[in-house]
Image (spheres, rainbow, N blue to C red):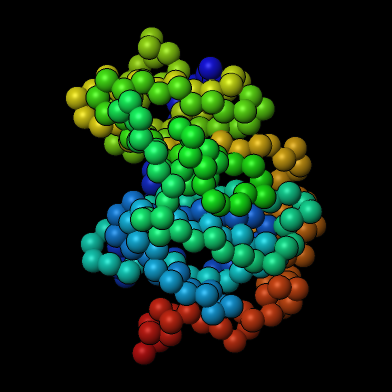
Amino acid sequence: MKVLEPLFVEASDVSAPAGFPDHPHRGFETVTYMLQGAVTHEDFEGHKGTIRAGDLQWMTAGRGIVHSEMPAAEGTQKGLQLWINLSSQHKMIEPRYQEIQSKNVAEAENDGIKVRVIAGEALGVESPIYTRTPTMYLDFTLKPGAHLQQPIPPTWNSFVYVLESEGIFGSLKSPSTTPHHLLLLGSGDGVEAWNKSSKPLRFILVGGQPLGEPVAQFGPFVMNTQEEIDKTIDDYQQYTNGFEKAKNWRSQSMLELDL
């Protein structure tokens, strides 16, 4: 089983009028998974929709996207967004979306364990999401007393992020992990989890195959070299090489702010 290193992170919370107005991306994928409320998404290609609680959007930015993500419901919107790097051969592919409503997310349940399979496979159920970078993204809920053994390819990087209640991971001798803590998994071929509390334990397990390539990041751009970052910034500022439509586009939320 994989060993654990604890970190503390926070899921994204946002309420109107705050949000994520028009901004670019290149060179990677974003995976948006809503936990509460809703977010409206719109991009410069005309793609628009609302991601509600339990819904999934897997966006491949590829060579370039400019989009906005703004609150679409009252109160606080809560969700997770994972960035997945693309290999050098895929960084400049055409943008693409894979979207699944909550009712269509693959699910399985056995021995007090329920899983929503965002990507990859668990409990004999496989997600329809196509992942260019081999990835697993699993949303587990364990009833009190439940015990999970989930295989993970030994060469993958992986982590656990606790959403609700508290759980024991890796070994029964490990201390309990509480919400908003991330466990970075080390070497091994899987992870074990126990729910020794009186409430359902909910956590996500994410893993992916390392690309073994250099990474250069500047804000919303993820490339392999600083030269590629510089070229991306120039492309965005000059509206070229994938960003042509950004020149005359503004999202509906930005247009409404101008009124």
Question: Residue 18 versus residue 187: which sits nearer the camera?
Answer: 187
Q: Is residue 146 left or right of residue 185?
A: left
Give the image location of residue 241, x and y in percent: 75, 73
From the viewer's perspective, is residue 96 above or below residue 45? Answer: above
- The image quadrant that residue 120 belongs to is top right
Question: Residue 54 versus residue 245: which sits nearer the camera?
Answer: 54
Give the image location of residue 139, x and y in percent: 41, 40
Report if residue 13 is visible in the image. Answer: no
The residue furthest top is: 173
Give the image location of residue 75, x and y in percent: 23, 62
- The image quadrant that residue 168 belongs to is top left
- The image quadrant that residue 212 belongs to is top right
Could you tell me how many numbered marks the image carries?
0
Q: Is residue 44 left or right of residue 227?
A: left
- Residue at (73, 63) in percent of width and height: 93
From the viewer's perspective, is residue 259 above or below residue 80? Answer: below
Question: Residue 153 versus residue 43: which sits nearer the camera?
Answer: 153
Give the image location of residue 154, x and y in percent: 63, 24
Q: Is residue 150 left or right of residue 164?
A: right
- Residue at (52, 75) in percent of width and height: 47
Report if residue 105 is visible in the image. Answer: yes
- Residue at (39, 46) in percent of width and height: 11
From the viewer's perspective, is residue 253 above or below residue 83? Answer: below
- Residue at (40, 23) in percent of width and height: 148
